[in-house]
Image: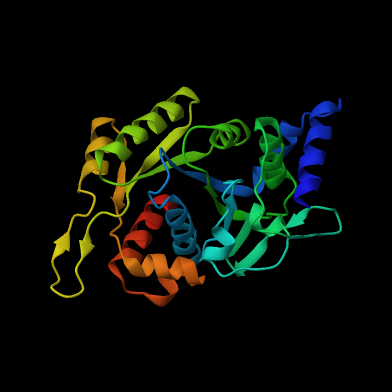
Amino acid sequence: MAEHIEKKGQIADQMPGPDPDEQARQSLEKIAQKFIIMSGKGGVGKTSVSVNLALALAKKGHRVGLMDVDLHGPDIPHMLGLSGMLTADETRKMVPISYSDHLKIISMESLMTNRDEAIIWRGPVKHAAIRQFIGDVTWGDLDFLVIDSPPGTGDEPLTVAQLIPDAKAVIVTTPQEVALADVRKSISFCRNVRMDIFGIIENMSGFTCPHCGKVVDLFGTGGGEKTAHNHGIPFLGKIAFDPEMVQCGDSGMAFQKKFTQSPITLAFQEIADKMAG
């Protein structure tokens, strides 16, 4: 089916007729709020943040769609313990995989028979694939669409900005300066494409030693909050580092389901309240 997306996208871009981009935009009319989760660089835990924000919103009873547009490194189904291929309904639209009654997932990983095979696509084909994830999926009525974008300011976030003009950006960073320098590029990207920035999240902000209880700032602290303040952007909160988060992602277990009262779980719930508010 991944090959089908590539071929169909190439044909659609060559054929005259209704604007496929506009048709995709119209399919989002039943979705109230759209958020794209971005990061300036890889390794800051952006996908973990995307998954946990979607889980926190769904836990509060909101109808949530989680779209994985990291086409070259789709990880969301694995992190949530989901398997199986996407199917199509009678209208030949893709049916998202249900994680729960309130959370649906769409990801390139669920279209691949060999999940170790590399996706080698140029920009126009990636644009067509994301367009199909938006317009050719039976999302239905949703309160939130959470979009996990690959790091950087390339084809995927640009396509989202073009196809979903009312999407708001949530930028994820870690506290150290090398990550913050890339965040400033993400801020510049959003302002250049006129995308609203909903706020900044500082991830991996402090680690509490399980033996002595001392908080160790592995990557520094406060850098994300300071950057948000300097650029006049809301600061959404800090997420601590916890090795259990890594283990849960690797094993396909939702962290918030296993650690319901963890400070990390509560932090995600507070950010979800801000998104819902």
For the point 32% across and 52% down, the residue is 203
Any part of residue 272 in sight = yes
Of residues 237 and 151, the one drawn nearer to the viewer in this rendering? 151
Quick check: 95 above or below 153? below
Q: Quadrant of residue 158?
A: top right
Colouring convention used in this rendered image of the protein: rainbow
Q: Nearer the viewer, residue 136 or 47?
A: 47
- Residue drawn at point x = 45 percent, y = 30 percent: 190
In the picture as drawn, the residue positioned furthest to the top comes out as 192
- Report the residue at 75% width, 49% height from top: 2
186 horizontally vs 101: left or right: left
Please provide percent x and percent y for residue 228. Answer: 28, 37
Nearer-the-camera pick, 65 or 189: 189
Q: Position of residue 229 (x, y in %)?
A: 24, 36
Q: Is residue 91 above or below residue 186?
A: below
Q: Percent position (x, y) of residue 247?
A: 41, 70
From the viewer's perspective, tell me whether residue 110 is left or right of residue 70: right
Residue 156 vs residue 17: left or right?
Answer: left
- Res. 63 visible in picture: no
* Residue at image location 20% in from the left, 66% down from the top: 208
**What is the total number of numbered labels drawn onto the structure image?**
0
Residue 64, percent from left and from top: 56, 58
Task: Say whether residue 117 is left or right of residue 223.
Answer: right
Using the rendered view, name the quadrant where residue 142 is placed. Answer: bottom right
